[in-house]
Image (cartoon, grey):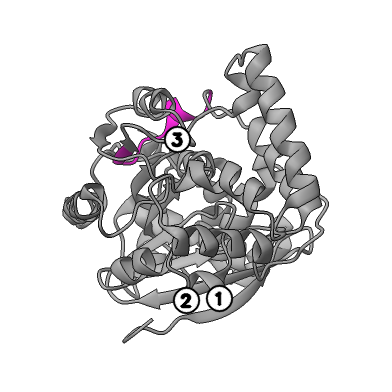
Amino acid sequence: MAALEQRIGFATARDGTRLAYAVHGQGPVLVRAAHWLTHLQYDWESPIWQPFLAELGSRYTVVRYDERGCGLSDREVEDFSLDAWVEDLETVVDAAGLDRFALLGVSQGTPVAIRYAAAHPERVSHLVLYGGYLRGFDHRDPTDLQRQARDAMTTLIRIAWGKENPTFRRLYTSDFVPDGDEELLRAYDELLRRTTTPADAARFEAAFGAIDVRDVAPHVTVPTLVMHLDDDRVIPLSAGQEVAAAIPHARFVLLPGRNHVIQPDEPAWQRFFRLVDDFLASDPDGDAGRAPHTPLTVRELDVMALVRRGLGNDEIAAGLGISPRTVERHLSNVYVKLGLTGKGARAAAAAATAHPSGTRS
């Protein structure tokens, strides 16, 4: 990737899973929630994701990672669940030292991003969702024929994943890039082979089908942009519309095309990046869509009570049974909610929270 370099690092999730993450580009920080079929190193050179990453990196400092079981992250892990994926996102942004950032959810990364944004509104300035859904296949009331087709695909995944099998490759990749040329299809086949094992690919299929964040989406309070292709062959348009309808005040934009992974020669390409640029440029302080005087959580109030007693971060961590890094994160959240910056933020926050009832208004 000309003129850009990526820096790869590793973070360890709470259950011991090692996660690979990468940083490239310059400008405001944009975090991409992990979705399957990524490989930090191969994506850097393949025609599938390289143009997309280069375009993003020319505008933003991009933080992305391989989810557990994929790419450079640990394989053969036990926990494949939405809860684990959200915790992995928390782990990566903490390891990268990020306090506040825009969050991008693509495809299966959408429900992960929604869950994270709902839980951490003080850290997400803007939420961008593309080609995603709220509920997986198991919750879409599929017909018997659709269930049979999915079962057949899962069987093929276990048998033919990543092998030189053009029939299987066309069945799978033709939905993701139906307008792709032979080079792109071959690259996608190579991505299948490199990214994960046949057994884990089948586990991903099952785990994605079980996702359901319909109860969480209405609690997202950060500014949200939802984009979806009008003829997406992987995630139906109705799923994208459901996402936008569930998130309060979300903006929905319909893009032309049917390649789930959009390519530079498509009309949707330029419009996608123009929409993202305009959306992220709005409200540069990141406060639009977030209610003023966001209440402090009980844990944040506990931390501030110990700050007012003059305790340092290590002492607070020991007293509350949490890590010093978690204390720092709680303090950062308090500063954001109170609009405080600079060296005097700690003292100012202590004074502002001396009467907790005032912070809950």
When the figure is inspected, residue 243 is found, relative to residue 352, above or below; the finding is: above
- The label shown at residue 226 is none
Please give the residue where the numbered disc 1 appears in the rendered image: 41
- Label 2 neighbour load within 10 Å: few <14, some 14-19, many 20+: few
Q: CA distance from mark 1 to mark 3?
A: 27 Å
**Tag on residue 233?**
3
Q: Can residue 66 be seen at all in this image of the molecule? A: no
Mark 3 / mark 2, whichever is N-terminal:
2
Provide the residue designation for mark 2.
Answer: 45
Give the extent of the magenta segment. 215-227
x then y, percent, for residue 5: 41, 84
**Which mark's residue is nearer the viewer, 2 or 1?**
2
Residue 148: horizontal and vertical position, in percent?
71, 22
Mark 3 crowd level (few <14, some 14–19, many ≥20, 10 Å Cα): some
In what element is the residue under mark 1?
Answer: helix
In the depicted view, which residue is nearer to us: 260 or 141?
A: 260
With 318 as the anchor, is 329 left or right in this view?
left
| Residue 98 image position (x, y, % from top left) | 45, 67
Q: Amino acid at mark 1?
A: Gln
Occupied quadrant, residue 226: top left
* Labels 3 and 2 touching (C-beta < 8 A): no
Q: Quadrant of the N terminus?
A: bottom left
Residue type of the residue flagged with mark 3: Arg
- Label 3 secondary element: loop
**Residue displayed at 57% across by 56% down:** 89
Image coordinates of residue 6 in percent, x first then y, are 45, 81
Residue 284, quarter of the rendered image: bottom left
Q: Is residue 271 above or below residue 41?
A: above
Q: What amino acid is labelled 2 in the image?
A: Glu
